Structure formats: C-alpha cells, structure tokens
Image (cartoon, rainbow, N blue to C red):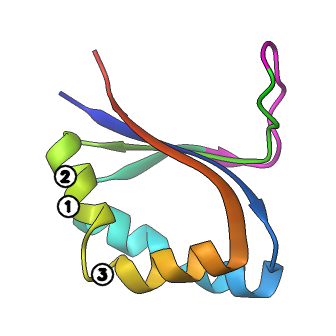
Amino acid sequence: MAAYLYVNIEVTDAAGFEAYRAQVPATIARFGGRYLARGGPGVRLEGDLVARRQVLLEFPDMAALEAWYGSEDYRPLLDLRKATSRGEVMAFEGV
C-alpha cells in the first residue's frame, strides 16, 4: 500500500534551504519515492492550518518511507531542513 509524506513548512533561511532543496530529490528517488506536489502557500478551505510551503511525496509503502526518513542519505539533509525551516511533517498510508 502506498504511503505519503505531507510537509507544511515555513522557510526561515532561504539560502540554506536551497542547499537542502537541491540535494533531497536524489535521496527520495533512491527509496522509490516521488513528488506528487510541491509549491508555495496553498489555499486553506477549512480549519486553522496555516498553509505555507506544501510538499506531498509518495513512496511504495510505509517501510520505504520510513527507511528513507531514517537513512544515512537523508539524515544530514534532515538536519539542514530543520535548521532552515519550521513546520509540520506527517506520514500516512493510502487506501
């Protein structure tokens, strides 16, 4: 069953985040992931969520998603993302 990673972040250091953005796609692809959507602020239709930079990734399954997120490939980039942005990240399985 496919698994998805949803990200809603505010970039706090544009130059540092650009280094993250340039390197992360290759790590995602190595674990079978792909971008479904990414871009600037979305339009909130309901609720209190503050829509910032939105990203939606798809992986073959939750095991692949978790393997990528915890991988040695991604760890330094995760640290870079946390240093250059703040927000929410959520993983969930599809139906």
Q: From the image, give the main secondary structure of the stretch colored magenta.
A: loop
Kind of residue at disc 2: Ala
Identify the residue shown where x is 71% and y is 69%.
85
Residue under circle 2?
64
Dots 1, 2 in contact, CB < 8 A: yes
* Residue 30 is one of the magenta-drawn residues: no
Kind of residue at disc 1: Ala
First along the sequence among labels 2 and 3: 2
Q: Secondary structure at mark 2?
A: helix
Looking at the picture, does residue 27 appear above or below residue 76?
above
Whole-angstrom CA distance, mark 2 to mark 3, is 13 Å
Q: Secondary structure at mark 1?
A: helix
Looking at the picture, does residue 60 appear above or below residue 12?
above
Q: Secondary structure at mark 3?
A: loop
Q: Of 46 and 18, which appears nearest the observer?
A: 46
Q: Of 62 and 24, which appears nearest the observer?
A: 62
Query: Of all residues shown, which one is farthest toward the front?
Result: 48
Whole-angstrom CA distance, mark 1 to mark 2, is 5 Å
Q: Which residues are magenta?
A: 38-47
Within 10 Å of the Cα at label 1, are there few (<14), some (14-19), or many (20+) other Cα atoms? few
Tell me the quarter of the picture where residue 74 sits: bottom left
Q: Of 23 and 91, which appears nearest the observer?
A: 91
Identify the residue shown where x is 83% and y is 43%.
41
Looking at the picture, does residue 35 appear above or below residue 79?
above
Residue under circle 3?
73
